[in-house]
């Protein structure tokens, strides 16, 4: 089983054309990754703190209906976190967060399983960055990393991260225990202004990371594995909005690796460049389907074999601008 730890919040999507009618979507980067894995048929458990309020109940239902195991969900007294998602006329999304004192960030050590027996754990985003619970999650991941693959997506939200140098120092610690790193070029530009993404990725591989993927929106992805570097083009799609694009990419990447015995520590050590290319091509396909729909709504495995899915994937009007 794959574990995903982090925030599960509500995206209140506000369309530029109808701002008076916001729509509530279950969201949060880690939860979207778990939903993608569950819908693709991977065994996945979500580790999150969910409120007992109406939005928390909506999140539980969404996870369960997407085949995500809820055994490690914490029943939280705090309220659900909110993200106000503004979508412009070309589908690009910007975010404003209401997270003070909400459920996602209040982890205690006794709320996390000591030996969960997971093949891999995906983490990152705000759940690993926000105090006070982020430090608890970091220590838990570091402890498990000796026997479990850790997958990291920083998914930077600058407005909530505080001092850039402090965040960079924490991210450097997270990289030390991560075997898989997926990061966008926009994230890197904020964390290390002026640094060359390729040089950063090469240094991470040299320091022991097994797979590094830098996503670049319509320019595709840069993939670093062993001593090789390849470019995977963006998958074509009819774009509605970009909400959940990068999360579905991460979930699909982990799904492919798991299905091909390249996710646990032993299997990941055997990953070769051609396999990495195939994994990222699949992830790009799933992200392309996701951006063809409103909100974070990744496809189910059954859709990938349908004629409808083929039409989504290959009858295109434009490439997605952000993953």
Image: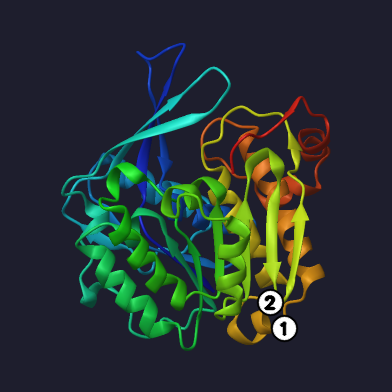
- Judge the density around disc 2: few (<14), some (14-19), many (≥20) Cα neighbours within 10 Å: many
Name the one closer to the observer, 155 or 18: 155
- Mark 2 or 1: in front is 1
Tell me where residue 267 sits by quadrant.
bottom right
Q: Are marks 2 and 1 in contact (CB under 8 Å)?
A: yes
Name the colouring of the figure: rainbow
Q: Secondary structure at mark 2?
A: loop
Q: Residue at x 64, y 45 (%)?
A: 287
Residue 170 on image: x %, y %? 33, 67
- Where is the N terminus found, in terms of image quarters? bottom right
> In the image, 123: left or right of 108?
right
Residue 290 on image: x %, y %? 62, 40
Specify whether residue 284 is in view: yes
Q: Residue at x 20, y 70 (%)?
A: 108
Name above or below for residue 27 compared with residue 71: above
Circle number at residue 270 = 1
Circle number at residue 262 = 2
Name above or below for residue 204 compared with residue 320: below
Name the one closer to the observer, 60 or 222: 222
């Amino acid at each position: 089983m794959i574990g995903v730890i982090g925030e599960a919040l509500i995206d209140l999507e506000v369309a530029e054309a109808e701002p008076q009618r916001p729509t509530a979507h279950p969201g949060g980067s880690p939860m979207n990754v778990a939903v993608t894995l569950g819908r693709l048929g991977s065994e996945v458990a979500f580790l999150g703190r969910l409120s007992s309020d109406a939005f928390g109940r909506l999140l539980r239902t969404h996870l369960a209906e997407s085949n995500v195991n809820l055994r490690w969900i914490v029943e939280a007294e705090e309220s659900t976190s909110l993200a106000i998602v503004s979508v412009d006329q070309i589908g690009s999304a910007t975010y404003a967060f209401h997270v003070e004192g909400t459920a996602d960030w209040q982890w205690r050590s006794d709320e996390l399983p000591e030996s969960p027996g997971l093949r891999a754990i995906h983490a990152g985003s705000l759940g690993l960055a926000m105090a006070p619970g982020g430090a608890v999650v970091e220590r838990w991941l570091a402890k498990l990393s000796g026997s479990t693959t850790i997958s990291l997506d920083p998914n930077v939200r600058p407005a909530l991260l505080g001092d850039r140098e402090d965040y960079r120092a924490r991210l450097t610690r997270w990289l030390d225990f991560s075997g898989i790193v997926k990061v966008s070029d926009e994230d890197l530009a904020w964390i290390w202004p002026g640094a060359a993404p390729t040089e950063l990725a090469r240094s991470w591989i040299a320091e022991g990371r097994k797979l590094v993927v830098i996503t670049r929106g319509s320019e595709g992805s840069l993939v670093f594995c062993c001593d090789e570097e390849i470019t995977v083009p963006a998958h074509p799609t009819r774009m509605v909005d970009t909400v959940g694009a990068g999360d579905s990419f991460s979930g699909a990447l982990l799904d492919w690796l798991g299905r091909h015995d390249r996710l646990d520590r032993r299997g990941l050590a055997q990953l070769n460049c051609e396999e990495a290319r195939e994994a990222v091509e699949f992830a790009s396909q799933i992200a392309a389907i996701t951006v063809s729909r409103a909100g974070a709504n990744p496809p189910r495995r059954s859709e990938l074999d349908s004629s409808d899915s083929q039409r989504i994937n290959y009858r295109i009007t434009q490439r997605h601008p952000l993953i």
